[in-house]
Amino acid sequence: MTMKALVLDQNTSFGIKLSEVELPALQSHEVRVKLYAAALNRRDEWCRQGRYPNIQNGVILGSDGAGIVEAVGEEVDKDWLGKEVIINAANHWGENQKVQSGEFQILGMPKNGTLAEYVQVDVDRLLSKPSHMSFEEAAALPLAGLTAYRALFYHGQVKAGQKVLVTGFGGGVAQFATQYGIVAGAEVYVNSSKEDKINKALELGAKAGFDYRKEAWVEEAKSISGGFDLIIDSAMGDTLPGLINLLVPGGKLVFYGATLGNPPMLDARRVFWNQLTIQGTTMGSDQDFRDMVDFVTKESIQPVIDSVRPLEKVLEAFELMSNGSQTGKIVVKIN
Ligand SMILES: NC(=O)c1ccc[n+]([C@@H]2O[C@H](COP(=O)([O-])OP(=O)(O)OC[C@H]3O[C@@H](n4cnc5c(N)ncnc54)[C@H](OP(=O)(O)O)[C@@H]3O)[C@@H](O)[C@H]2O)c1
């Protein structure tokens, strides 16, 4: 059986190509999901650019997907057949809630991912698709929704009434973090490169937004908010000193990425004197994933979706992510 899929090929000028590929035999503990939609994450773009560790040509990219179970392996309960599902892209987290195991892997490198007509995964990666979401909306949820959930609740311990800053609102994870914080009763502020993105955050209930391209944005944010109890960031790089400056004494910075690279300096005295915490985080455990899906379902949270395009136009989706003009998740409709 063959299918259309987006494979990594670093010998092409764009680094990826749509190909017809063979589906391997289904393993006894696996299910075959016919995908109706998938979504991009910055990770896919890092892979395309050859900037992700241990990349392998021929791997199908994509961590996020939603679809219908079409076939089950010998050991899998046949009740899964025909179910509408989402896929948890975090594999082999392990039992320790604090940190992932050494076997931890993300779907879509090294294992074949979701930017394809079908994906084959272990049955324990499935959860029912939230009923308030379409396939396109559900496909936007798993990786970013999970990362934002752990950052805000497990590490951030966000509480009602706290002041929270989410940086880079246009990002796939950031729009979830913003919405979760608002639902949790926090006073949420954002920063972004574009006014229309800030306006979208305000529409969702954010208190105020700041343009991080302006040199004075840190002073502006400080004078309007009075400082933040919690900051959720993935930019890092030379933005770190400004973020540290914006934390109130006892505040916490939780970061899940370093898009701008390593910070050139850290005001260590400010960190120890003000009893600040700088906490790294990555995706989340199976427990975090179940809790996140329950929370999103209970609160009827809908992902901010930038755009939806067919698999045939998936290269266009990568161009969009590459130039950073999206607001929220970039979705690919498949079947
Ligand atoms: N550790 C994990 O498990 C995990 C999970 C997901 C993502 N990540 C990492 O987190 C980062 C974001 O991922 P994503 O999928 O959300 O990416 P994305 O959708 O491409 O979003 C990236 C966002 O970064 C923001 N940004 C760029 N420069 C900035 C600056 N100077 N200050 C503040 N924000 C800035 C932009 O916000 P505006 O558009 O608003 O300007 C952009 O939309 C990536 O580095 C990714 O690899 C890590």
Image (cartoon, rainbow, N blue to C red):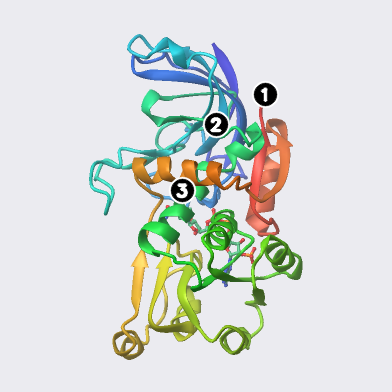
Q: Secondary structure at mark 3?
A: helix
Identify residue for label 1: 335
- CA separation in Å, label 3 and label 2: 15 Å
Identify residue for label 2: 129
Q: Secondary structure at mark 1?
A: loop
Residue 178 position by quadrant: bottom right
Type of amino acid at the residue the image marks with label 1:
Asn
Residue drawn at (48%, 18%) of the image: 32
Query: Viewed as shown, does residue 214 lie left or right of 23?
Result: right
On whether ligand 1 comes within 8 Å of the CB at mark 3, the answer is: yes
- CA separation in Å, label 3 and label 1: 25 Å
Query: Viewed as shown, does residue 265 lie left or right of 1?
Result: left
Sequence-earlier tag: 1 or 2: 2
Sequence-earlier tag: 3 or 1: 3
Identify residue for label 3: 146
Residue drawn at (37%, 28%) of the image: 124
On whether ligand 1 comes within 8 Å of the CB at mark 2, the answer is: no
Q: Secondary structure at mark 2?
A: loop
Type of amino acid at the residue the image marks with label 3:
Leu
Q: Residues within 10 Å of mark 3 (few under 14, many from 20)?
A: many
